[in-house]
Amino acid sequence: MSAFRSLSHRQQGLLLTGGGALIMSPDALLIKVAALPDAEILMWRGLLSALGFFLIVLVRHGVRTLQAYRRCGWTGIAVALLFSLTTCGFVLGNQYTRGGNVLMILAGAPLIAALLSRIILGERLPRRTWIAIVLCMLGIGMIVIDDAGVGSWVGNGFALMAATTLALNFTLCRRRPGVDMSPMLVFNGLIVGGGAALVLLLGGGGIEMPPLDRWLLVVLLCLFIVPAGVTLLQRGPLYLPAAEVGLLLLLEVVVGTLWLWWILAERPTTLGFIGGGLVIGTLVIKGLHERRLEQRLRSAVGID
């Protein structure tokens, strides 16, 4: 911990954001390898991640845990509900289409958030952002209309739902930028897990433990990887400019797709590859350009 604190703010941000993205990179892969039915994977992911997030909240806030929840207010409740939809969209997307498709579509969430900020908050967007939005939407459209026999329209639709609700979450959190909303992720897990458990019980199938090997994968993913990765990703942007955060977040998309390609041989079709390349390429070029602009601005005002 002392070694981490001795680093500069930028180095801390790079370590936190990059580390969080790399930790989260096998998320889609492990969902597919676990190969559990929809309701079961949602139930275990929700309940186990809720426990993991709550333990992190206790470690971070200690006796002030209740105050951390009170600061979130009604906005925090909306954040929990929206992130529940994001979780369902991500998990179900991976159940019905290639994981690479889901990751590529989810990568467009920041630009969807920019578009929603223009609509909801009335923020003006520079021309480069409009161009990036058009190119990314074109790329996402190419992924969505990919071969329905391999890349299911249902799965792509769930992935698009995850990206849109995540973008709504970004927009909502910007209305209270000084408040840490991460404690509300506990309720996201309870909503997803409780809802899925209710579906299982009402469906008459009951709740059964998965085979031990799959159960261990689920515990690794939902109790450790998801809470740790999301927490690091939530903390990293406090130390880095937005452009650098956006570039580092692409690590999860690229490395996650490579995991799927290597372990499960999930090769994208030509159309999906072009669409994904258009999304990633646009975000990289936009991020590098904005990073250069931020560096010029910091130099102009004399900030190191």
Image (cartoon, rainbow, N blue to C red):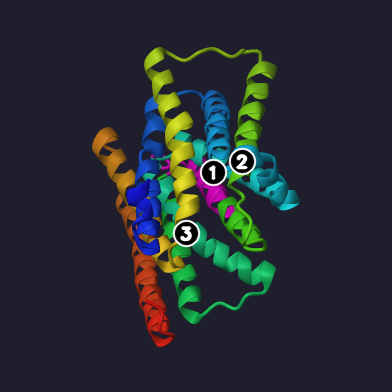
Q: Name the residue furthest right.
A: 74
Residue 69 location (% of width, % of height): 68, 44
Q: Which residue is mark 3?
A: 237
Against 265, residue 76 (above or below) is below
Amino acid type of the residue tagged 2 in the rendering: Ser
Badge 1 density bin: few <14, some 14–19, many ≥20, Cα 10 Å: many
Question: Is 77 placed left or right of 32 in the picture?
Answer: right
Magenta stretch, residue numbers: 148-164
- Tell which of 262 and 293 is nearer to you: 293
In the image, residue 16 lies in the stretch drawn in magenta = no
Query: In front here: 222 or 300?
Result: 300
Location of residue 257 by image quarter: top left
Position of the C terminus, as image quadrant, is bottom left
Q: CA distance from mark 3 to mark 1?
A: 27 Å
Q: Position of residue 138 (x, y in %)?
A: 45, 64
- Whether residue 166 can be seen here: yes
> Residue at (50%, 61%) from the top-left corner?
110
Q: Give the number of the mark in front: 3 or 1.
A: 3
Mark 1 lies on residue = 158
Residue at (50% x, 51% y) in the render: 234
The verdict on residue 157 being magenta is yes
Q: Main secondary structure of the magenta part?
A: helix
Identity of the amino acid at label 3? Pro
For marks 2 and 3 on the same chain, the one whose residue lies earlier in the sequence: 2
Q: Which residue is mark 2?
A: 84
> Which tag, 1 or 2, sits closer to the chain's start?
2
Q: Is residue 57 above or below residue 105?
A: above
From the viewer's side, name the closer residue of 136 and 297.
297
**Tag 3–tag 1 contact (CB < 8 Å):** no
The single residue placed furthest to the left in the displayed view is: 262
Neighbour tally class for label 3: few under 14, some 14-19, many 20 plus, Cα within 10 Å:
many
